[in-house]
């Protein structure tokens, strides 16, 4: 495990301490879980951004192919 020193806003610290009293969880465990949750959220946001970008690329290609098919003369 790594040791980390950080500064927390007084209001956030106070609210955290109140919550910790109610849920009876060590501060270190609570902060670790919060960071883990936030990391997962950030990974999801990165993935969403990448998928939107790739989807837009595929959409443009798909529209181009569709237009080409519409221009084809079909003979019965």
Image: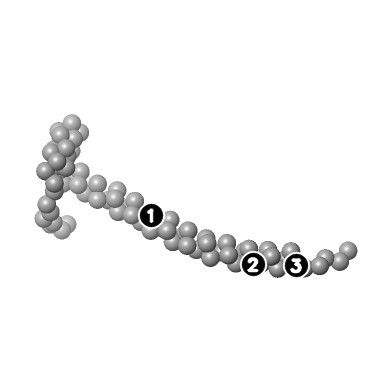
- Identify the mark nearer the N-term, 3 or 1: 1
The mark tally for this picture is 3
Q: In this view, does 42 lie to the left or right of 14?
A: right
Q: In this view, does 53 lie to the left or right of 42?
A: right
**Dot 3: within a 10 Å radius of its alpha carbon, few (fewer than 14), some, or many (20 or more) residues?**
few
Q: In which quarter of the image is residue 64?
A: bottom right
Where is the C terminus found, in terms of image quarters? bottom right
* Most distant residue in the right direction: 76
Does residue 55 lie above or below 8 as drawn? below
Work out whether mark 1 precedes mark 2 in sequence or the reverse, and give the earlier one: 1
Considering the numbered disc 3 on the image, is that residue within a helix, a strand or a loop? loop
Q: How crowded is mark 1: few (under 14 residues within 10 Å), some or many (20 or more)?
A: few
Q: Nearer the viewer, residue 29 or 69?
A: 69
Closest to the camera, between mark 3 and mark 1, is: 3
Read off the residue under disc 3.
71
Q: How far apart are marks 2 and 3 (CA)?
A: 11 Å
SS at circle 2: helix
How crowded pointer 2 is (Cα within 10 Å; few <14, some 14-19, many 20+) is rated as few
Where is residue 63 shown, x and y percent of the image? Answer: 63, 63
Front residue of 47 and 49: 49
Which numbered circle lies on residue 64?
Answer: 2
Q: Name the residue under label 1.
A: 45
Judge by depth and name the residue closer to the eye, 22 or 47. Answer: 47
């Amino acid at each position: 495990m790594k040791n980390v020193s950080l500064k927390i806003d007084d209001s956030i610290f106070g609210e955290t301490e109140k919550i910790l009293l109610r849920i009876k969880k060590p501060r270190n465990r609570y902060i670790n879980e919060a960071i883990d949750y936030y990391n997962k959220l950030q990974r999801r946001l990165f993935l969403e951004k990448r998928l939107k970008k790739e989807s837009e690329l595929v959409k443009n290609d798909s529209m181009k192919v569709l237009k080409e098919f519409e221009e084809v003369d079909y003979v019965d």
